[in-house]
Amino acid sequence: MWHFRLWDVQDVAVFLSIALYMCHLAGAISIHSPQKSLTRSVQEDVFFSVDITCDGIPTIQWTFMSGAVSRTIGTWQPGLYTNITVDYSSRVQHYNNGSMGLSDLRLADAGYYQVTVTETAGSSKDAGFVLKVNEVLYEDLQYLSVSALALACLTGLLMLVMWLLDKVYRKIVAWKRRKEMPENDATELQPL
Ligand SMILES: *[C@@H]1O[C@H](CO)[C@@H](O)[C@H](O)[C@H]1NC(C)=O
Ligand SMILES: *[C@@H]1O[C@H](CO)[C@@H](O)[C@H](O)[C@H]1NC(C)=O
């Protein structure tokens, strides 16, 4: 009975240490992100805010996914190196806490963004964000106002041309009349 009990205790101890080890593995990295779903408009900026804690220096990788598309945006290790994909290099800002800023949004930027944090020991954890990108209304408005302005300019130009033509026509008529005048003048002046 005592022997049996001892085994029990040992089993529990082994189980506990395995559980603790697993907990340690899983718990070593933590990714805190206040907002997982964001909506922005075209040409705006977005900031994927995360705060990473882990043992040692983490490797942070951001990946973009949309439908069948999956591409790496960038990978960095704070203080060691930064590798941002060429397509994104002009629009991405990276931060030591894992956060990423993306500026000048396009419609094609809508999708799923995943940050993967890998520890020196090899374990990793990820977190995802959903980004919606709306087409901007003011772009349409801008387009409309530009069209209206162009129309107004064109109308103004047409009116100016018509006014000029009218003036030229009047001048020609006046000139023609003056050309015919001398005889009339002569005949009219004769009696005087
Ligand atoms: C991460 O760092 C950036 C820049 O210092 C900061 O703006 C942001 O709030 C941080 N994110 C979190 C979740 O702490
Ligand atoms: C940078 O990242 C790209 C894409 O993930 C990869 O092909 C390239 O080898 C990396 N360059 C360096 C210097 O790590």
Image (cartoon, rainbow, N blue to C red):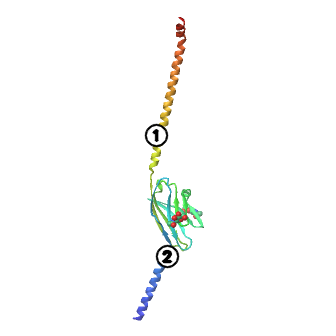
Q: Examine the rendering and report whether any part of residue 61 can be seen.
A: no
| Residue depicted at 50% across the width and 33% down the height | 157
- Front in this rendered view, residue 181 or 98: 181
| Residue depicted at 51% across the width and 24% down the height | 167
Q: Cα distance, mark 1 to mark 2?
A: 64 Å
The furthest residue to the bottom: 2
Query: Which amino acid, mark 2?
Result: Leu
What's the mark number on residue 190?
Answer: none
What's the mark number on residue 25?
Answer: 2
What count of labels does the image hold? 2
The furthest residue to the top: 191
What's the mark number on residue 148?
Answer: 1
| Disc 1 residue crowd, few under 14, some 14–19, many 20+, Cα 10 Å | few
| Residue depicted at 43% across the width and 91% down the height | 6
Q: Earlier in the sequence, mark 1 or mark 2?
A: 2
| Residue depicted at 57% across the width and 62% down the height | 83
The percent position of residue 47, horizontal first and vertical second, equals 50, 60
The percent position of residue 72, horizontal first and vertical second, equals 52, 62
Task: Give the quadrant of the C terminus.
Answer: top right
- Front in this rendered view, residue 117 or 169: 169
